Structure formats: C-alpha cells, structure tokens
Amino acid sequence: MGFGALRSIIRPVSRALLSTRTVSSFAPISSPANSICPAPELRHLFNTFRPRLPWIPPSSAFHSLTDTRFPKRRHSDKPKRKRASLRPPGPYAWVKYTPGEPISPNNPNEGSLKRRNEKKRIGQRKAFILAEKKKRKAQMQEANRKKMIKRVERKMAAVARDRAWTERLAELKKLEEEKKAATA
C-alpha cells in the first residue's frame, strides 16, 4: 500500500476527529471583557481567549502527515549565497600575456574558447538579423513596385475606357443625325 493511499485514508478521519473535538471543546463563553468594553475596536485587546472556528483545523500530529504543501520560506537575517561554490576556480578566461607587450583582445589561449565562441555566436546572430532585414526590405520594395505598376495600369485602362466610350458616343450621335436626315 503506497503512501498516497494511506494519506487519503488518514486525511478524512483526522479532519472528522479534529472538527468534532474543536466543536465540543470550544463552546462560546461569555467573558467579562465583552460586557466591560462595548467598543468593538478595543474588545480584541481584552479578549485573550478567542473561540476557534470549526472549519479551520488547529495544528495536530496528523496535520504534518497529511499536509502536501511546502512550508513557507522564511527570510533570514543575511542574504543567501549566490551559488558561489558551483563556480569553477580560476579566472574567467586565460589570456596569453608577455610582460611589456599589450594584450590583444582577440588572442586568448588555445584552450580558452569561451568568449571567442560567444563573440562568434553574437556576430553570426547580428549578421543573420541584418540579412533578414535586408531581405524583408527588398521584398517590401518589390511588392510596392508591383502595386504601383498595377495602379498605373488600372488608371491607364480607365482612361482608355473613357476615351473609347466618348468615341462610341460620338459615332452613335452621328448615326442618329444621319437617320434623322434620311427620314426628313
């Protein structure tokens, strides 16, 4: 039988025992403080014994067994160490150094690839972002150019339609006049 099954059996029993015990033992008592001090703000100062509510179980032996939550983290008077024990000993990166000569920023030891690889990664990321930006800019320019061409084509087609319509109207007027002249 696992611990979970045992806990699920114990929890309701312990709650039932605690609720019956609290209801029977903590009956409301009329204290003289209530009659002396009518102000509700000052009543809690004089009232040393407060009846506990039955739905809030007091701490008991079962409570620690059945409680699944983690305890609250208490603050301490000195701050917690920042995992300094996990940091390897020694400097951040080993660098070649000859006394009297300046240290070159891009010349670490053969084994110290830490910052070099990091710089390379940063550079590659920046280059990729820049290339994508240029690509998007070119795509936008191409799309805008195509849009402008289509707009110009639509305007030219509209002008051509208007011109053709005016010519057709002129032809129809001529035909009407010829018909009128022929009938008259």
Image (cartoon, rainbow, N blue to C red):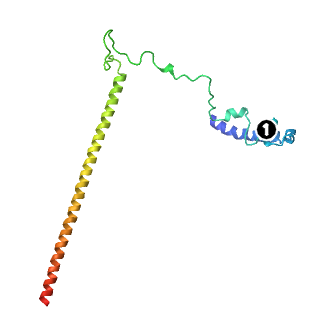
Q: Residue furthest top?
A: 99
Placement of 50 over or under 153, stated as above or below: above
Is residue 1 something one can see in this rendering? no
Q: Quadrant of the N terminus?
A: top right
Q: Residue at x 78, y 41 (%)?
A: 41
Write down the residue under mark 1: 44
Amino acid residing under circle 1: His
Q: Nearer the viewer, residue 160 or 49?
A: 160
Residue 91, percent across and down? 42, 16
Placement of 90 over or under 156, stated as above or below: above
Q: Residue at x 30, y 40 (%)?
A: 133
Residue 163, percent across and down? 18, 69
Placement of 92 over or under 157, stated as above or below: above
Q: Nearer the viewer, residue 77 or 25?
A: 77
Q: Secondary structure at mark 1?
A: helix
Q: Quadrant of the C terminus?
A: bottom left
166 with respect to 88 (left or right): left
Residue 156, percent across and down? 20, 62
| The quarter of the displayed image where residue 115 is located | top left
Is residue 5 something one can see in this rendering? yes
Placement of 1 over or under 80, stated as above or below: below
14 with respect to 104 (left or right): right
Q: Residues within 10 Å of mark 1 (few under 14, many from 20)?
A: some
| The quarter of the displayed image where residue 65 is located | top right
Residue 56, percent across and down? 73, 40
Q: Residue at x 24, y 54 (%)?
A: 148
Q: Nearer the viewer, residue 35 or 58?
A: 35
Task: Count the labels in the image.
Answer: 1
